[in-house]
Each structure stands twice: as structure tokens, then as C-alpha cells.
Image: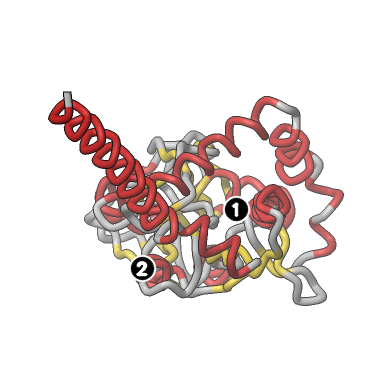
Amino acid sequence: MRGFFKLLVFIVVFAVLGAFSTKAADMSLWRHSTLYKIEKRGVLRVGLNAGYMPFEMRSKTGRIVGFDVDIAKLMAKAMGVKLKLVNTDWDGIIPSLLTNKFDIIISGMTITQKRNLKVNFADPYFVVGQTILLNKKWAGKVKSYKDLNSPKFTVTVMLGTTGDFAAKKYIPKAKIEEFQDEENAVMQVVQGRADAFVYDKPYNTIFYETKGKGKLIFLNKPFTYEPLGWAISKGDPDFLNWLNNFLRQIKHDGTYERLYKKWFVNVKGWINKVH
């Protein structure tokens, strides 16, 4: 009987220590989560590249505004923290995330297998595809990206974007010129220094409607499929879970639809407020 009592005490003590050890391990993992650090800091730091109309862009007063910015504001509000936007060159945006310059990339980033080797993506929140803005001298002569696959064509892209990758993959024979921002790249076509600009449909649609009519031809049928996602550092399931639940919530409570209409449908409501 005495031996049984000792065994029972040992089992109880072992169970308590095991539970304490498990709880301590769980707390240790939680302290390594980005969510814990954001709450402790009281600030959500969002990395983006202000130039991808209408996702993120500069207003005439210098503020960064757009669809992604509004989502980031809602995200910070849901966390109960302040928002800090960190404008970053596109070709350095993933390295900046990995060196803790910010907590998340919300910048119209296409989910690719290559990028996924370095970062984790939340579920897609938008789907785009590459389209072409063409110099009007090629009207009726160039009908798709396939017609541009010749050394006689100069095609502009934004460095490091999926437009850059798509041009090199699908029209490799053309002369590809890379630029640090969309505006400079597309203006080469407007000014006749290049023949075509390859970029995402939302940007090309708005540029054509506001600045390109009569100057450009819009080949608006996407020739790629590109889901966009929010990127975070690897090894953080808590943050990933929170983001996916946040996305699910705003897509089903009407918030996402309201923001979509604001930035992609009612363009006249904001276009004169930006460059």
C-alpha cells in the first residue's frame, strides 16, 4: 500500500511538472511569434513599395494611400495597435522583411514558388495577370504578347516584378529594359522610346483610363495567372493563422467588397488626389 502511495505521488508530480514544462514551452514559442512582438511594441510595421496604383501610391500631399494601405489600417485596428508604413525599394523588400525592418509585406506581391522558398504567404487576397500597354503605332499589328517576341521590339518592365519575369519568359527575343518604378517604365512607351510595357492588369487599366487613351493600345487580356498574398517570415504559424482568419472575416462581412469598390470601381473618387 505504501509503495502504491509513493507511485501515485510520483505520477501526480510527474504530470504537474510535465504540464508546467509544456506550458512553459508554449509560452516560449508564443514570445517568438511576430504577433507577440507587435502587441508588445504596440505598432504593426508594414513593408510596401508606393507606386503600384491603386494598391499603394503617393497622394499629392505625400501620403501613402491605396487598397493595401486601407487593409493595413484595418489589420492594425483589429490588433489594437498603431500602424507604421515602411516604404521600400521593390528589389530589396524581401531582404528587408527577413532582416526585421518590418513585420509583414502588404504590397501587391504575387505568390511565386521562388519567393515562397524565402517567405510564407497568407491565403491569396487578390488575383491579377500580366497585360500590355502598347505604343499606338503598333495598333492592329501587335495583337498579343506573342507578337512582341522579336528583337525589333523594346519592352519595358519594373525591375524584380512578375512583369519582369513574364517578359523574360514569354518574350525572350525582345529587348527588355528594366526600371525601378512603373511610371518611368510606362512613360517610355507613351513617349515612343519603347514599344510595350508589361505589367499587372489593375495598374495598366487605371493608367490607360486616366493617361493612356489616344496614346496607347491596351491589350487587356491577362496572359498569366498571379495570386497576390501577404508575406511574412517563415516559422510563424500563429501569425499566419491570424492573417488567414482576418482575411476570411473581411471577405465575408462586406469590408473587402467596400474597399474593392472604392479603389477599383470608383476610380474618379481618388484619381485626382494622386500624382
What kind of element bears circle 2?
A: helix
Q: Please say if 28 is above or below 259.
A: below
Q: Position of residue 92 (x, y in %)?
A: 39, 73
Q: Quadrant of the N terminus?
A: top left
Which of the labelled discs sits on residue 216, or is there none?
1
The type of residue carrying mark 1 is Leu
Q: Position of residue 17 (x, y in %)?
A: 29, 46
Report the side of 181 relative to 166 (left or right).
right
Q: Please say if 214 is above or below 272.
A: above
Residue 183, quarter of the rendered image: bottom right
Q: Position of residue 237 (x, y in %)?
A: 39, 45
Please state which of residues 78 and 18 is positioned toward the viewer in this rendering: 18
Q: Position of residue 101 (x, y in %)?
A: 47, 74
Name the residue at 19% across, 35% down: 6
Distance of label 2 from label 1 (alpha carbons)? 39 Å
Which of the labelled discs sits on residue 98, or is there none?
2
Name the residue at 67% across, 57% down: 69
Name the residue at 59% across, 51% down: 203
What kind of element bears circle 1?
A: strand
The type of residue carrying mark 2 is Leu
Q: Nearer the viewer, mark 2 or mark 1?
A: 2
Q: Please say if 213 is above or below 144.
A: below
Q: Using the rendered image of the protein, determine whether residue 81 is visible from the camera's viewpoint.
A: yes
